[in-house]
Image: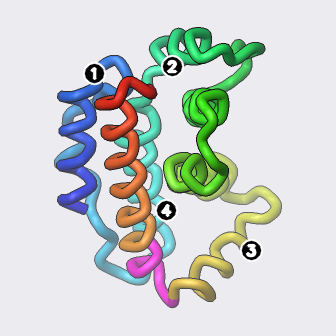
Amino acid sequence: MRSLKNELRELGEKAPGLWKCKEERLFETVHLPVTSSEREWSGEILELAKLMVEGLEAVYLRRKAVEAGVVEIEKLGSIALIEAILRSRGWEDDAVGSIVAPLREVQMLRTKLRGHASGPGTRSIVAEVVKRHGSYVAHFRWLTSESQASVRRLIECAERGVL
């Protein structure tokens, strides 16, 4: 978790137009879950989404999308804008996926677990997480590792002027 936070701080320093922390306190409050509690895990997912995904700057990304020749950007959110920009620049599916998949996973889990906790499919998502990773803690570790790699790639894209 510390490594992901460090990467996010670096992203904010190197590409403040692309990502800004909306609430500095999140750097202190987001932690790995320590129990087997679904509630604790889903709460940490919510905080992780606030820290990582909400910091993406849609206005900046829309401007970059226009520069990259992406059309019909009005309805696209930040993650979809990143995907569209990279694809318009000729990036392969695997490379694009390595950046956007962790962001989408965090946002989807936030929406399903906290926003629509009683909605259809929530129980199956939770069951799949436990089946695939063995525990909520193991899943969160995996997710933060994937997210750290995604943020590292965002930094590289910003440094090269891609984003």
Q: Earlier in the sequence, mark 2 or mark 1?
A: 1
- Judge the density around disc 4: few (<14), some (14-19), many (≥20) Cα neighbours within 10 Å: many
Residue 156, x across and y down, in percent: 33, 40
Q: Earlier in the sequence, mark 2 or mark 4?
A: 4
Q: Quadrant of residue 55?
A: top left
| Residue behind mark 3 | 124
- Marks 2 and 1 sit apart, C-alpha to C-alpha, by 12 Å
Q: Quadrant of the C terminus?
A: top left
Range covered by the magenta-colored residues: 134-139
Residue 122 horizontal side relative to residue 109, left or right: right
Front residue of 155 and 136:
155
Residue depth check, mark 2 versus mark 4: number of the one nearer the observer: 2
Q: Is residue 100 above or below residue 82?
A: below
- Judge the density around disc 3: few (<14), some (14-19), many (≥20) Cα neighbours within 10 Å: few
Q: Quadrant of the N terminus?
A: bottom left
Q: Amino acid at mark 3?
A: Ser
Mark 3: which secondary structure?
helix
- Judge the density around disc 1: few (<14), some (14-19), many (≥20) Cα neighbours within 10 Å: some
Q: Amino acid at mark 4?
A: Ser
Instruction: Evaluate whether residue 111 shows in this view.
Output: no
Residue 150, x across and y down, in percent: 42, 51
Q: Amino acid at mark 1?
A: Pro
Residue 94 horizontal side relative to residue 6, left or right: right
| Residue behind mark 2 | 61
Q: Is residue 132 above or below residue 87?
A: below
| Residue behind mark 4 | 42
Instruction: Evaluate whether residue 157 shows in this view.
Output: yes
